[in-house]
């Protein structure tokens, strides 16, 4: 298991490197495949040695080798977070065929969180493929759970849609669609995922108000990162949280 988790963790850092391309290009309507990675400032194509996840950023001390412009800390953080999250999935959920939907879910959530933090949007070009892959893997690998997954996806979508209609300034349609896509993967675990997302969002909102005072009420805080945190927790521990709730309050 340690070997598998390490190998998948290293794979995760490579996926994280690709996610950085997605985060930078997708909101701009650019291809995530062509051209090859280049410096956002000077446009110089990067050599392979400058594309090693995390390590290249450290070796270059966070600056472009060619123009010296600072490279955002987001790059190594996304790579490291993806690697750690991938390894955690293997350690907690095991090394099995379900990784075909679990790891893409984690990757999509991290990309959505990073894009929402940087651009305040969650693009359809990310959420739609995410939902399609969730549906495809459900049909192929989880046929016995199709009803649960469909209900979870529809329920999460409608719940956040109602929230968006009540408070358009606090909830965007990207959040609504992301929650629906999450439900297609998580099934019943979407319930603790949504609870954690709203709890984390509320705590951060309270913290912003505490720091900024009345002006904090008008500070926009993207909800996508909280959905991502909730979704990953739901994936790793959702079933256990549901069982704990049942044992505490329903038995």
Image (tube, rainbow, N blue to C red):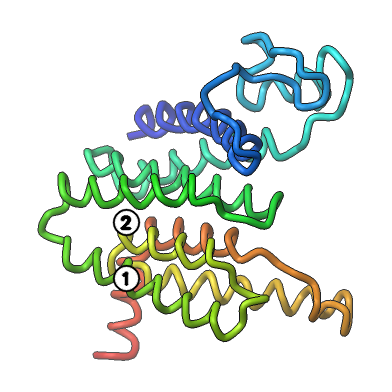
Of badges 1 and 2, nearer the viewer stands 1
Question: Residue 103: which quarter of the image?
Answer: top left
**Toward the viewer: 11 or 179?**
179
The residue at 68%/57% (across/down) is 120
Instruction: Of the two numbered discs 1 and 2 on the same chain, state the one appearing first in sequence.
Output: 1
| Percent position of residue 211, x then y | 87, 75
61 above or below 89? above
Task: Give the secondary structure at mark 1.
Answer: helix
CA–CA distance in space, label 1 to label 2:
12 Å
Question: In the visual, does 114 lie left or right of 211?
Answer: left
The residue at 44%/47% (across/down) is 106
| Percent position of residue 240, x then y | 33, 67
Q: Which residue is mark 1?
A: 154
| Percent position of residue 192, x then y | 41, 72
12 above or below 172? above
How packed mark 2 is, by other alpha carbons closer than 10 Å (few <14, some 14-19, many 20 or more), is many
């Amino acid at each position: 298991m340690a070997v598998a988790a390490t190998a998948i963790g290293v794979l995760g850092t490579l996926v994280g490197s690709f996610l950085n391309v997605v985060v930078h290009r997708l909101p701009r309507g650019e291809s995530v495949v062509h051209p090859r990675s280049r410096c956002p400032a000077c446009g110089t194509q990067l050599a392979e040695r400058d594309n090693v996840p995390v390590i290249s950023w450290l070796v270059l001390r966070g600056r472009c080798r060619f123009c010296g412009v600072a490279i955002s800390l987001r790059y190594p953080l996304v790579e490291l977070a993806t690697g750690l999250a991938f390894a955690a999935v293997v350690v907690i959920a095991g090394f099995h065929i379900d990784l075909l939907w679990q790891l893409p879910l984690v990757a999509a959530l991290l990309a959505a969180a990073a894009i929402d933090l940087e651009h305040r949007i969650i693009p359809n070009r990310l959420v739609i493929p995410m939902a399609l892959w969730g549906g495809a893997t459900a049909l192929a690998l989880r046929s016995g759970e199709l009803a649960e997954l469909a209900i979870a996806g529809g329920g999460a979508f409608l719940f956040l849609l109602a929230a968006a209609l009540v408070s358009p300034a606090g909830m965007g349609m990207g959040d609504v669609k992301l929650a629906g896509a999450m439900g297609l993967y998580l099934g019943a675990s979407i319930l603790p995922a949504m609870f954690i997302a709203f709890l984390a969002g509320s705590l951060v909102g309270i913290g912003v108000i505490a720091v900024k005072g009345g002006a904090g009420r008008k500070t926009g805080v993207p909800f996508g990162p909280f959905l991502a945190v909730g979704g990953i927790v739901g994936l790793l521990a959702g079933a256990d949280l549901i069982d704990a709730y049942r044992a505490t309050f329903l038995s």
